[in-house]
Image (cartoon, helix red, strand yellow):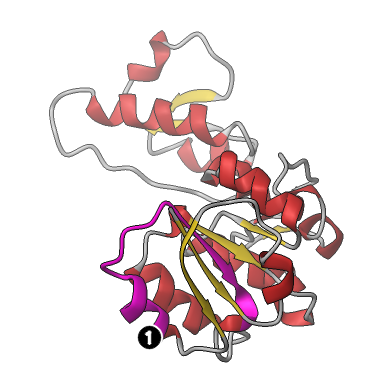
Amino acid sequence: MNVIVANKYQSMLEGLQIDVIKSLNGEFEADEIVNQFQNFFYQRMILDITAIKNYQDIRNLQKLSISLDMSKVILLLDDSPESSSPSYLSKLISMGIYNFTRNLDGIMYLYNNPNSYRDVAQYQQLDNFTTTAAQAQGAAMRGAPMNSNVAMQMTRVIGVKNVTDSSGATTLIYMMKKHLEKNYSVGVVEVNKRDFMFFKEKDIYSADDSNAQSIINAH
């Protein structure tokens, strides 16, 4: 069973062909929504963003993300400049809010095919990564799989320290590379070790203190 929290788009949400166990209409503080549903069992929550009082302040969405299971929440966005901005959408993603759309078709798509981080990763701004507003209002907003042109302006370095005598860190770094390169250009450098010599794969390097920085700078 599902719950609906609506305000501006109440009439639109009444057209959803889903079972509804509870429905709230109006404008509510984020804490009020948390108190209503934190211990309430539901399959999906359809949340009209205009039902959140002062939703333009991303901290109110953060209150929800801390207390509710956002994988069950489908956020219906409005057309305001705030919720349409790439920065706002990026912050939603950072909070674990991956399911957002602007129409009924998008709601039903996400109802049956919830997004994971991988589906929306291209739209997250990670310091030196940028997206465009047009992309942010594209296929992702309809709940569909997304394509984007993500521009990497500078190199981001992630350091991993091995605290055991085993090769656990080597395995972890390799898994991280395989995951990240689905969306980004990734190079891996191990320092003062030779575990990566056995990996027959490009963009994996073994270095020492004398040349590690030069390898990083080259990429």
Instruction: Write down the quadrant of residue 98 in the picture.
Output: bottom right
In this rendering, position of residue 97 left or right of residue 163: right
Instruction: Write down the quadrant of residue 196 in the picture.
Output: top left
x and y percentages locating residue 127 in the rendered image: 60, 64
x and y percentages locating residue 101 in the rendered image: 70, 59
In the figure, 28 relative to 5: above or below? below
Q: Residue at x 52, y 60 (%)?
A: 97
Instruction: Give the camera-side residue of 83 and 30.
Output: 30
Can the viewer see residue 198?
A: yes
Q: Which residue is mark 1?
A: 31
In this rendering, position of residue 161 left or right of residue 122: left
Q: Secondary structure at mark 1?
A: helix
Residue positioned most to the right: 134
Range shown magenta: 31-50
x and y percentages locating residue 39 in the rendered image: 26, 67
- Quarter holding the C terminus is top right
In this rendering, position of residue 184 left or right of residue 97: right
**33 within the magenta span:** yes
Amino acid carrying mark 1 in the image: Asp
In the figure, 201 relative to 43: above or below? above
Instruction: Give the camera-side residue of 218 and 86.
Output: 86
Q: Residue at x 69, y 70 (%)?
A: 77
In the figure, 182 relative to 139: above or below? above
**176 within the magenta span:** no
